Amino acid sequence: MTAAELQQAAKALAAMFSCFPQSALADAEMQLRGYLAAVQDAELQDVEAAIRRFIRGEAKMANAQFCPSSAQLSIEVRERRLMRELTAKRTGQLSASSSPPPRGGEVARRSRDGEGSALREIKAG
């Protein structure tokens, strides 16, 4: 992540920390550094998606009443990356498979419009 993205991730983490009870003995600055170190190589969108899932109670965790550990956050970030990549791959496959053959659509249009020799023209040309 870039420095600006790390700042955005820190803000998202701070929001998550405010949603869960914290120990009075915890050093907030050190805790934030630890979480950032755990996700520094991830994409910001995956980190933010993982944090949203924890805040909403959608992520897998042993006890939803407490803040997830940095390891739990890292696992959820990896899952978000995998889901994003699978969705992108699936979307790419769907758009590629749903597009008509380059000339087949032309044959269908010409046939629909009553141009009966369209198939012969395309086969010949």
Image: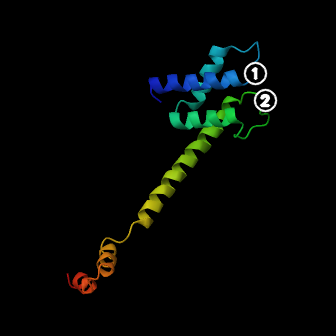
Query: Residue 30, relative to residue 77: is it above or below?
Result: above
Circle nearer the N terminus (1, 2): 1
Out of 41 and 48, give the one closest to the viewer. Answer: 48
- Answer left or right for 123 relative to 86: left
Asked which quadrant contains residue 23, the reply is: top right
In percent of width and height, residue 66 lies at 76, 28
Q: Which residue is mark 1?
A: 21
In percent of width and height, residue 70 lies at 66, 29
Q: Are marks 1 and 2 in contact (CB under 8 Å)?
A: yes
Q: Which residue shows up at 44% across the image and 27% down it?
A: 2
Q: Which residue is mark 2?
A: 65
Asked which quadrant contains residue 27, the reply is: top right
Out of 38 and 104, give the one closest to the viewer. Answer: 104
Q: Which residue shows up at 60% across the image and 20% down it?
A: 33
Where is the C terminus found, in terms of image quarters? Answer: bottom left
Looking at numbered disc 1 in the image, what kind of residue is underneath it?
A: Pro
